[in-house]
Amino acid sequence: MTEDVLAAKIDELAAQVPDMSRCIFNVHAPPWGSNLDLAPELDEDFKPTMEAGGLKMIPVGSTAVLEAIRKWQPLLSLHGHIHECSAGVKIGRTLCINTGSEYHEGVLRGTLVILDPKKGVKNYALTVG
C-alpha cells in the first residue's frame, strides 16, 4: 500500500486507543531513517551496490510509520521487515524495536520486552535462536 494509505490506516486505528501510553504498535515496516531500516542499496539490476567500507546501506523504511510514531507516541513499536537491522531506538518517548532475522543463514531473532505497569518499558533484550 502507499505511504498515504498506510498513514490513514494507522491514524484510524490509533484514534481508537484510549491510553496511548499503554499502546504497542506492531507494524511490519520500520520507521524511515531510524537506523532500524538500513538495507543494501540496489542498482537497476537489483544487485547490491558497494562503497569503500563494503555494502552501501540506505534507509528504506516507512515515512508514514515514522510520522505516526512521532504523532501518537505509543509506549512501544515493534517492526520486522528489514532483516539486516536488529536494534532498538527511541523516537520521542517511544521505544522502537526491529528484531531482524537472517533466514538465509537459519538465524531467527526475537525480542524479550519487560513491561512495568507503572513505568512502561522496563527493559528489553534482543534474542538469537
Image: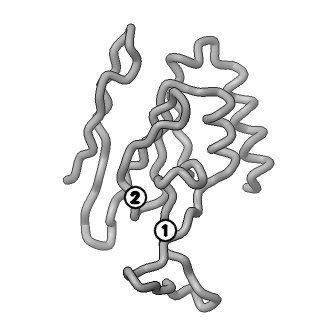
Question: SS of the residue at dot 1?
Answer: strand
Mark 1–mark 2 distance (CA, rounded to whole Å): 8 Å
Q: Residue at x 72, y 46 (%)?
A: 6
Q: Residue at x 64, y 18 (%)?
A: 17
Q: Which residue is mark 1?
A: 39
The local crowd at label 2, few if under 14, some if 14 to 19, many if 20 or more residues have their Cα within 10 Å, is many
- Where residue 123 appears, as percent x and y from the top left, is 29, 28
Q: Which mark is residue 53?
A: none
Q: Is residue 73 left or right of residue 97?
A: right
Which residue occupies the extreme front position in the image? Answer: 52
**Which one is nearer the viewer's eye here, 2 or 71?**
71
Residue type highlighted by circle 2: Cys
User: Which badge, 1 or 2, comes first in the chain's sequence?
Assistant: 1
Q: Which residue is mark 2?
A: 85
Quarter location, residue 44? bottom right
Do the numbered discs 1 and 2 sit on residues whose CB atoms are within 8 Å? yes
Quarter location, residue 8? top right
Residue type highlighted by circle 1: Ala
